[in-house]
Amino acid sequence: MLDIRLVSAEKDKVVATMPIGPHHRQQVGYLHGGVSVVLAESLASLGTVLNIDANRQMAFGLEINANHLRPKRDGQLTGVATPIHRGRTTHVWDIKISDEDDKLICVSRCTVAVVDRPPDNGNLFEQKLPSFG
């Protein structure tokens, strides 16, 4: 869908590229800010997974902010995520998104929650919800 391509993934740095196509643009033809946010959170989440015991824990985006610094219509984006904090229950990542000329398009900070996986026989999304009927 968004054509995000992983370039490298290490515990201290995750890099991916994404070409800007028609489906990445908002109504007046520029890169939609939400696309940059998806790229940023994807990199932060993958970085967190690389730093935890994925057999025992899971990563969920908890908070993200983004500053869109320069408009872009087409070309290639490169996102680079580096950890600021890797704690027991949260990781915080700095993400810089640049274009093919190395001009900064967006800066983002993403906090990722680290939670224990449910027991093998339990599904996190099948928890009982209160009835309102």
Image (cartoon, rainbow, N blue to C red):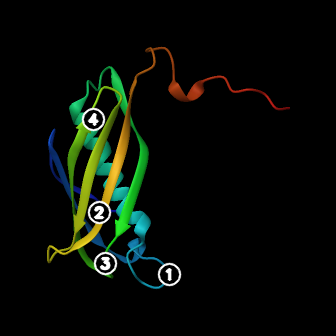
Identify the image quadrant of residue 78.
Answer: bottom left
Residue where numbered disc 1 is placed: 27
Mark 1–mark 3 Cα distance, whole angstroms, equals 17 Å
Residue furthest to the bottom in view is: 28
Q: Earlier in the sequence, mark 2 or mark 4?
A: 4
Q: Earlier in the sequence, mark 1 or mark 3?
A: 1
Q: Position of residue 125 (x, y in %)?
A: 55, 29
Q: Earlier in the sequence, mark 4 or mark 3?
A: 4
131 and 88: which is toward the camera: 88
Q: Position of residue 112 (x, y in %)?
A: 36, 40
Q: Residues within 10 Å of mark 2 (few under 14, many from 20)?
A: many
Q: Earlier in the sequence, mark 4 or mark 1?
A: 1
Three-letter code, disc 2: Val
**Is 40 situated above or below 60?**
below
Residue where numbered disc 3 is placed: 70
Residue where numbered disc 4 is placed: 49
Residue where numbered disc 2 is placed: 107
In the image, which is nearer the foreground, mark 4 or mark 3? 3
Identify the image quadrant of residue 71.
Answer: bottom left
Q: Residues within 10 Å of mark 1 (few under 14, many from 20)?
A: few
Residue found at x 29% / y 63%: 107
**Is 106 situated above or below 49?**
below
Query: Is residue 1 visible to the viewer in this orientation of the structure?
Result: no
Mark 4–mark 1 Cα distance, whole angstroms, equals 35 Å
Image quadrant containing the C terminus: top right
Residue found at x 33% / y 20%: 56
Three-letter code, disc 1: Gln
Q: Residues within 10 Å of mark 3 (few under 14, many from 20)?
A: few
Name the side, left or right, on which 99 lies relative to 25: left
Q: Earlier in the sequence, mark 1 or mark 2?
A: 1
**Is 42 situated above or below 50?**
below
